[in-house]
Image (tube, rainbow, N blue to C red):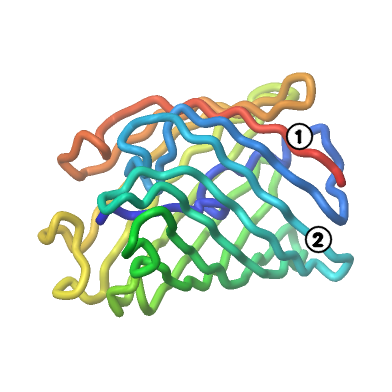
Amino acid sequence: MTTSFKKLFCALPLAVLSTTAMADWSATVTGASDYTFNGVSQTKNDPALQGSLDKAFDNGVYAGSWASNVDFDGGTDLEWDFYVGRYVELQHGWSLDYGIAYYSYHGGDNSSDGNYPEVYTKFGYASDYGQTEFNFWYSWDYFGTEAGHTIAMVAHTFEVAEGHAIRASFDVSNSLDGDKYAWDGEHSSYHHYRLAYQTSYEGFDIEVAAENTNLDWNTADERIVLLVSKTFAL
């Protein structure tokens, strides 16, 4: 089995560029040339159609659901995620985003065997030089294998012109129980780096990203990924 994303929390921080104001309820539709999670294609290098429905509260609490087509062995063709968290503005430019997500898989007789929970914590720092992120994810039952698993990411987004930004990120995925889960049965960890251009046009958020990993797979090698999304206030 390959790895899955948020996905929501790794993928596309385009809200800072969007001209659509955040509403209590919102929905987002995304078309992607490939659905990658930490550099690994979840669709065997094919396109994806994705959507989310989100509810935001005045105290920073939010909840939502996100779905995408996938292409896993055993007939799994749908990922459907649920999450709840809270975003807090701290002092001196710092922010904190934390919560829990649950990833579920559908389409095959044993697809649900890969369902798993994950907690996350994201620290942000805004300065005159852009937005820096320090993001962490942890699961105690990665893909239903009872393996502990972590992802650590550092990222920085800076504006190169009004409405145009560059985001650079580096993350490490690490299995804490390599005897229970490893990529291809041999890699207990791998790293992924990504460089993305982000903009918006006529209400659509657009990202073009170049990414690669140190895994020697045709679903995790160097690639260019295009994402176009539209957010609707409900």
For the residue pair 31 and 36, the one nearer the viewer reads as: 31
Q: Position of residue 96 (x, y in %)?
A: 67, 66
> On the rendered structure, is 16 left or right of 108?
right
Q: Position of residue 151 (x, y in %)?
A: 39, 62
Q: Quadrant of the N terminus?
A: bottom left
Residue 75 numbered tag? none
Q: Place residue 189 in its image quadrant.
A: bottom left
Q: Which residue is mark 2?
A: 56
Q: Place residue 178 in its image quadrant.
A: bottom left
| Residue at the spot 51% in from the left edge and 31% down from the top edge | 32
| Residue at the spot 41% in from the left edge and 68% down from the top edge | 115
The type of residue carrying mark 1 is: Ser
The crowd level at tag 1 (other Cα within 10 Å; few <14, some 14-19, many 20+) is: many
The crowd level at tag 2 (other Cα within 10 Å; few <14, some 14-19, many 20+) is: some
108 w.r.t. 212: above or below? below
> On the rendered structure, is 231 left or right of 44?
right
Q: Which residue is mark 1?
A: 18
| Residue at the spot 62% in from the left edge and 66% down from the top edge | 83
